[in-house]
Image (cartoon, coloured by chain):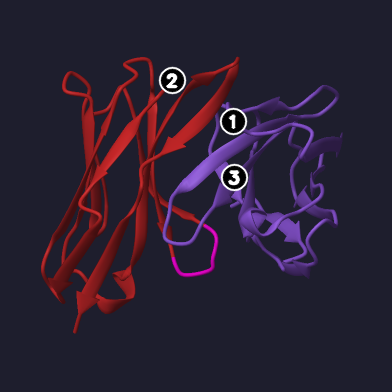
Amino acid sequence: GENVEQHPSTLSVQEGDSAVIKCTYSDSASNYFPWYKQELGKRPQLIIDIRSNVGEKKDQRIAVTLNKTAKHFSLHITETQPEDSAVYFCAARGVNSGYSTLTFGKGTMLLVSP
Amino acid sequence: GAVVSQHPSWVICKSGTSVKIECRSLDFQATTMFWYRQFPKQSLMLMATSNEGSKATYEQGVEKDKFLINHASLTLSTLTVTSAHPEDSSFYICSAPRGGSHNEQFFGPGTRLTVL
């Protein structure tokens, strides 16, 4: 099955700096890569996603890049703000027993200091 | 976006009892729903795929007799933790894709289960 590795596990930055989180996946058939932000005790919220036919996608301060050949994708947050502090999960979607299922990375705790 | 609810939001139970958690898609129909378990400071682990009108598909290592799943309708899936033990204490989250499992998944708010 799919295996998703995520780095780093924790990331501390100063407000205004950029933050980059990287993920790799193992199944070349995976075709959809969402990123979720989860605050303590709350549900994961989709912040951006990218499909395998696109190399880059941007939404204001957030961007995601995908390298299908190398099977890795990255989340870039620019001009970080304290409210960006949360745990971020990458995921890869492939087909599992006939259903499209998500495999999550282990998460990155982002701390943005004012 | 689509709305998915869960009930209860938290539950405390004694060891050996059973606990039922409901997952509802409020403004769309979901033939497929997913159940995840999340331990503190860990990732979401897929437990099973719930299918309306058929048996659930369980991930390797998940006991189907312990975690009973029933997809009663196109808007409701339930997860019953039978004979709960302290090691079952976790955050259980469901998700539902709108329009098929290949679409974006919308997550419920989660249920915090504590087994004493």
- Distance (Cα) linking label 2 and label 1: 14 Å
Q: Residues within 10 Å of mark 1 (few under 14, many from 20)?
A: few
In the picture, the disc for residue A106 is: none
Q: Colour of chain A?
A: red
Label 3, secondary structure: give it.
Answer: strand
Amino acid marked by disc 3: Tyr
- Tag 3 residue: B36
The correct choice, above or below, for A41 with respect to A73 in the image is: below
Residue drawn 79% across the image and 33% down it: B65
Query: Which percent across, then down, holds residue B4?
Result: 69, 53
Q: Is residue A33 magenta?
A: no
**Is there any visible trace of residue A65 in the rendered image?**
no
In the picture, the disc for residue A1 is: 2
The correct choice, above or below, for A73 with respect to A87 in the image is: above
Q: Colour of chain B?
A: purple
Q: Residues within 10 Å of mark 3 (few under 14, many from 20)?
A: some
Q: The disc numbered 1 marks a residue on which chain?
A: B
Main structural element of the magenta stretch: helix, strand or loop? loop
**Is there any visible trace of residue B62 in the rendered image?**
yes
Question: Which tag is nearer the camera, tag 1 or tag 3?
Answer: 1
Query: Which percent across, then down, holds residue B75?
Result: 81, 42
Are discs 2 and 3 located on one and the same chain? no
Q: Which portion, as a residue range, is magenta? A: A39-43
* Pointer 1 or 3: first along the chain: 3
In the picture, the disc for residue B61 is: 1
- Distance (Cα) linking label 1 and label 3: 13 Å
Amino acid marked by disc 2: Gly
Amino acid marked by disc 1: Gly
Are discs 2 and 1 located on one and the same chain? no
The correct choice, above or below, for A67 with respect to B111 in the image is: above
Are discs 1 and 3 located on one and the same chain? yes
Residue drawn 81% across the image and 29% down it: B52
